[in-house]
Image (spheres, rainbow, N blue to C red):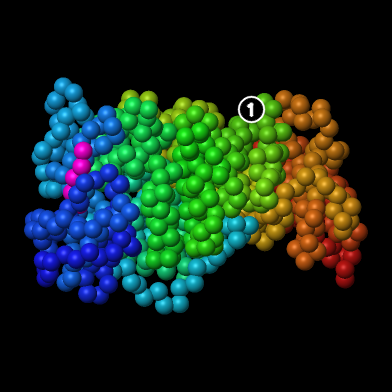
Amino acid sequence: MTVNSRIIAGRPYPMGATFDGEGVNFAVFSQHATRMTLCLFSEDGREEVFLIDLPECTGHIWHGYIAGLRPGQHYGYRAHGPYRPDEGHRFNPHKLLIDPYARQLSGHPIWHDALMGYDVTAKHGDLTFDTRNSARYMPRCIVTDPAFSWGEDRPPRRSMSESVIYEAHVKGMTAGRGDIANRGTYLAMASDPVLDHLGRLGVTAVELLPVQAFLNDRFLVDKGLTNYWGYMSIGFFAPEPRYMATQDIAEFQHMVARFHAAGIEVILDVVYNHTGEGNQMGPTLSFRGLDNASYYRLAETPRYYIDDTGTGNTLNSEHPMVLRMIMDSLRYWVEVMHVDGFRFDLCSALGRTAHGFDRNAPFFQAIRQDPVLAGVKLIAEPWDIGPGGYQLGSYPPPFAEWNDKFRDQVRRFWRGDAGGVNKLATRISGSALRFDHDGKPATSSVNFLTAHDGFTLMDLVSYADKHNEANGEENRDGHSDNRSDNMGIEGPTDDPAIIAARALRRRNLMATLMLSQGTPMILGGDELGNSQMGNNNAYCQDNPIGWIDWDHADADFLRFCQQIITFRRTHPILRQTRFLHAKSRAIDGEPDIFWRHPDGRPFTDACWLDPNLRALTVEMRTASGTPEYATLEYAILIVFNGGGGLTVTPPPVRPGHQWVCHIDTARPDAPPRVARKRLAVAAQSVVVLVMEPDPAAHP
């Protein structure tokens, strides 16, 4: 390490550690610190060899420049200031701190009481002050040069109407495949077997569970478990180190480039609502030690934290410098890492002000005006656990939103719950009552049946109850109301009738997802019949419970998934941006959606209110108001039959056309067939007809 020991003023921008070819500029925010010490480490990162106070503070940004430093330099900070928890300040210079803008971390904290800013053995807990040096237990920040040879990289820029999103975990996707090198890493995720599988399946985007650097919670480590999902962020710019094969951030960029070359977008699940530092009894790792009163939302008694996230703290996105950090992070991942969008975990927390959730909060205003983010996908998880936190449908454009109502009500319909038909109709038509406002498109509803949190699709039809004993919490964790159905036996079975019923139910569920207006998302592994053995909260299962089981893939179901995704892609009626409201169309005077009883007569109020009705037939057309250039096909008829076998009377066709059956979940391998005046529909099945020109009428 060659260091000019003389530090000069440097600049307050850009934030973080920036290499300019001659040296490194350091800039870190703290409004309440009285002094900021930069700690430089030896080449192996073990020895703290230089402690240098940053000489300047401009607008609460501490900064300095050191010539001679190069990428690969390990560093951290020590912040000086008042330790007065009752006033919201928790400065402790004995604690090495992570730079919030660090582009790379050397690893993870090693849990030890020295990571705490207070004496854990003292009677008054966090009001005490601990003087142990935490450096030996802390990861190092690493100066990086993020330059990468992107070549001809062209982000696919898929519209939401074209999108089929695939939620995946970097390690879980690849750890169980013996034919992939560097399993569990970004390089493995970008391997030919993974890309080939996703390409054949027909998905257009992968939504990766958190890949920004995160913690292993101490209580999990003590139980021999790990934070597998990653929702405890500690570095919003640094790729998670455990997914690197060679500790080079270029591996992440390589992964993105490979996905783009395959025509697949990369969406990141990001956690800007809280950090891994927890509540007042948590460790001092970064934000708490740099400026607790600025980074976090504090309670009326500022010793304590407002916890709208269930993790102990909530980031203060109203503070301009915290908001700037979030925006800088988002832009970094787009401009430097080339990602295509973001799914915001517990997004309601980002829209909170002193008065509660506000769809015009600073975060939403900032993100909507940002030119860098204008071209990427923005998806909200539209809730947190705070008061008034459930805000499905309340987000401003261009946000799309995870629609848990779709998940719950589609599950209930296929389970056979009473009164499910009217709710199913609402969901398959795009949940207009929630989303049709403020100019939002029908694709705003991100429809899903399963996600990382909850049962897999296979477990949804195999278990009536959760089985989370492996999590070490005596099965108390995870949701108990799963709207699941074991079809008669709990868990795996050799009974051929139950196996067949479960396979049919999975086809029905997947078909419902792909035939609905909105943007579909599937959980990685569902297409293979992957099971977590009834664990509906596998957040700590970095093992075969949480990994995809490739060795026992269900080839028949995979083939059906490919079929139904292809059908969706080739039929624009199923993925419109305009909502269907049964309005007459100018081109023919016909309504754009028509609800029918299986016998062909229109649905009446009595039908909608009939709790025993188990079947719904819907005829969809191009939405009223669609320009002529976008009117690409005439009509699709879908029968959702959650009851016994029935006979359906298709509606009349336009002259020279006929109804052709393309999808029948009870006969998934049947070739297309013409449907005349009456059509037999098997019990518990979905049938799809397309109005097509009759060859006999067009010789």
Residue at the spot 51% in from the left edge and 53% down from the top edge: 367
Which quadrant of the figure contains the N terminus? Answer: bottom left
Residue at the spot 70% in from the left edge and 59% down from the top edge: 572
Residue at the spot 81% in from the left edge and 45% down from the top edge: 582
Q: State left or right for residue 56 relative to residue 603.
A: left
Residue 354 visible in the snapshot: yes
Residue 147 or 477: which is nearer the viewer? Answer: 147
Residue 56 or 646: which is nearer the viewer? Answer: 56
Image quadrant assignment for residue 469? top left
Q: Which residue is mark 1?
A: 417
Residue 510 visible in the snapshot: no
Image quadrant assignment for residue 11? bottom left
Outermost residue toward the top in this view: 123
Image quadrant assignment for residue 586? bottom right
Magenta stretch in the rendered image: 77-82
Residue 462 percent location from the top left of the image: 49, 34
**Above or below, 624 relative to 314:** below
Q: State left or right for residue 364 relative to residue 298.
A: right
In magenta segment, residue 385: no
Residue at the spot 75% in from the left edge and 47% down from the top edge: 580
Residue 119 or 652: which is nearer the viewer? Answer: 119
Residue 390 percent location from the top left of the image: 54, 34
Which quadrant of the figure contains the C terminus? Answer: bottom right
Residue 77 percent location from the top left of the image: 20, 52
Dominant secondary structure of the residues highlighted in magenta in the image: strand
**Above or below, 197 relative to 86:** below
Q: Amino acid at mark 1?
A: Asp
Residue 135 percent location from the top left of the image: 13, 48
